[in-house]
Structures are given as structure tokens and as C-alpha cells.
Image: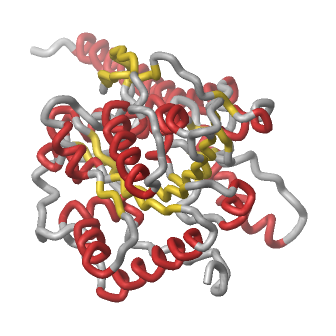
Amino acid sequence: MVDPRAVEVGEANARRLGAAGSRLQVVLFAAAIWLPLIVAIDQRDGGVSEVEKRRLSELPTLEWSAASLGSFPARMDRYYDDHMGLRLALIRMQAVLEIEWLRRSPSPSLVVGRDGWLFFGDERAVAQYQGAAELSPMQLDAWRRYLEAERDALAARGIAFLVVFAPNKHSIYPENMPDHIPRVGARQPLTQLVEHLRATSTVTVLDLRPALLEAKKRRRVYHRTDTHWNDTGAHVAYREILRAVAAELPGFMHRQPVAVAESRATVPGMGLARLVGLSERYSEEITTLEPRAPEASVAPEFRASHRERVRRLEPFAMQVDSPHLPHVVVFRDSFGNALVPFLSESFGRTLFAWSRNVDPRIVELEKPDVVILEMAERFIGDVPESQFSPSSGR
């Protein structure tokens, strides 16, 4: 026979446990709601996400106007999303979950390759790797017309012209791309463009792929966790550029490629790992090459503002005290960063300008002996327009 008092005691205990459980749920729910806000109030993010490489939303202002009142909720949502406490920890947790458990990329800007290799997920670069972004005959001819216009305008000023294409990492290390991104065509746009220009034009075009593919048999030439070449790859490109410049300037008495000192280190993962907050999980073994006896220094007119100009992607110049070395202007993108220490040592004055187009204003100011246009492979789907006037150089 069941003891009524025992039943009553059991029911009371169950009610107490249920109440305690409910209170615990309330506490946990409140913590989940308020903890990120408390952390957000205390944290100082400086307005810039080092992980995502972008400026975060600013605290919205509220004005007594229909437009301001109507947009305020959405602006406040964006601000909270960007400044929510524990945001970076949550980004890292999501990245670990998706990469290591779900075997997929946590960001459309990232392709997770084999053996710890990360690739830039840029749609153009991926399509070029797949052979699914062939250039049309109109695009190929537009490139020819553009480069010939630049070549002719510069030649009229006594300036040589060299075009350098920096290969996508996908083109140099295709074996490390994942299986779920298959190749659907055999012809890459850069191959199309180089073959077209060599068949129809006399513009000097430097395709670095053969030299880099040969060099990678001996040493790694791109970073595993960044989209760019490493110092080894940049030095290969630098030597090829010197050979091409020597062919364009018969009187160019350039020195031998600058002798470099090598050092190695293991550092946290670079740009692509930082993109998803996993720089501590993806390490990078880097090889640093530095000129053994550097002679180049920042040109006097840029010394006071050099760091700020580099940060703001503004032009700056390096120079060597030698009247016999030619002057060069390098229009470049981010692949040009690693070339700066090397090219600076081989020319009398080297001005670096962040641009994928030749700027006539800089050319007129610098009056160089050579103009180098360096461009990453992924940008060749967009043909620049000449900034020289139609009659210039004619």
C-alpha cells in the first residue's frame, strides 16, 4: 500500500526541482541575452574588424525626420550585429564548426583546400581556375587595343613599357584545391590573353607562371594561409622582371639580382585564416628574404609621410644613389607589396603607385625610363581604359 505522506513529499520535491529548473532556465536565458551586451559595453574594438578587414558600423544618430526615424531600427540592428559582445569568439566557433565538422567554408571569401591550404574564394579567381571564365574575342581585342595605346603613348615619351601578370594561387597550386570545385574547362583566361597578345601584338607581356611553377618544385612560392606569393615567389618574379626590363632597355646596365639573407619562422595564420578568426589554428611557416646590404631608401620628399602614405595606399618612391641606374614607375596591386624591397635595390628611383591602370599624371611628373604595370590574374576580366588623351604620343 502506498504511503500518502511519501507521495505528498515526492510531489513537493518534484515541484521544488521543477521550480529550480525553471529558475535556472530563466538565469541562463538572461545570461545569453545580457552577457553579449555587457561585454559589448566594456569592449573597445576601435571601429575596425581586424578579422574581417572592414570598418564596423557606427552608433546611429536619431533625428526628428521621417527618413531618420524610419531607418533607425535597421541601422541600430547593424550596429549591434557589429559590436555584439563575444562576436569574435562566436565567429571563431562557427568557423571551427563548419571547417572541422561540416567540412565546408564558413565564408564565401574562403576556399578550404587540402592539407591546410586556404584559397581566396573570389568568384573571378575560382571561375578562372575552373576554366569557366573564358575571355570573349571582344575582350581579347579590347586588351590588345588598351595595351598598345599605353605602349605607344609611353614610347612617344621615350619610355619603355612592361606588363606583368601575377598568377592566382589557384593557378600555381591547383593540386591543393578541394574536389568539390572541379575543373570544367582546360583553358584559363590568362592563357588566352597571353597567347592572343603574342600572336597579334608586340606589347611586352610577362607571364610569370612558368618561372613560378618551375621554382615550386624546389620551394614553396605562395603562402598557405594567404592569397599572395611569399618572399620566395616574389624574388622569382623580381628576377624575371629584371630580365624583361633588360630586353626593353638595351643600355640598361643593371646589377645582378640583389643578394638576400634568408630567415624562417612559424607565425599565426595570415590573411585568409584571419578572415574567419582562425589565425591561431592555422599556422604559417614563412621564409623572409631581405637584401643583405640594402642601399635603397625612401626618397627625401616622401620620408616624413612614408608610413602614412603606405597605409593609405598613396604613391611613394625609393631610390639608390647611382646616376647610372634607370628610373621606374610601378603601377601595381597587392602582389606588388613583396616586390618593393627587391625592385627598389635595382633601379635609381622606383615610384610605386597603387593602381591597375597607367596614370599619365604620375608619368609626366616622374619621367621614368620604364613603366611596369603589374596586375593580379583575377582582374583580367575587366579591361582598363586608357587615361592618355587620344592624341598623346601620336
* Whether residue 95 can be seen here: no
Corner quadrant of residue 285: top left
Q: Residue furthest right?
A: 64
- Left or right position of 264 against 385: left
The residue that appears at 35% across and 78% down in the rendered structure is: 201
| Residue under the image location 68 percent in, 52 percent down | 76
- Picture layout, residue 299 above or below residue 21: below
Relative height, residue 44 to residue 238 (above, below): above
Q: Position of residue 213 (x, y in %)?
A: 18, 45
Asked where in the image residue 38 lies, by quadrant, the reply is: top right
On screen, 292 above or below 344? above
- Percent x, y for residue 179? 10, 52
Q: Is residue 17 visible?
A: yes
Q: Would you place residue 281 above or below residue 376 in this image?
A: above
For the C terminus, the image quarter is bottom right
- Quarter that holds the N terminus: top left
Q: How far from the left and from the top, in percent, is residue 207?
A: 29, 57
Closer to us: 153 or 315:
153
Quadrant of residue 46 within the rendered picture:
top right
Name the spot of residue 66 as percent of width and height, x first.
Answer: 83, 72
Report the residue that reaches farthest toward the front: 251
Viewer-proximal residue among 101 and 370? 370
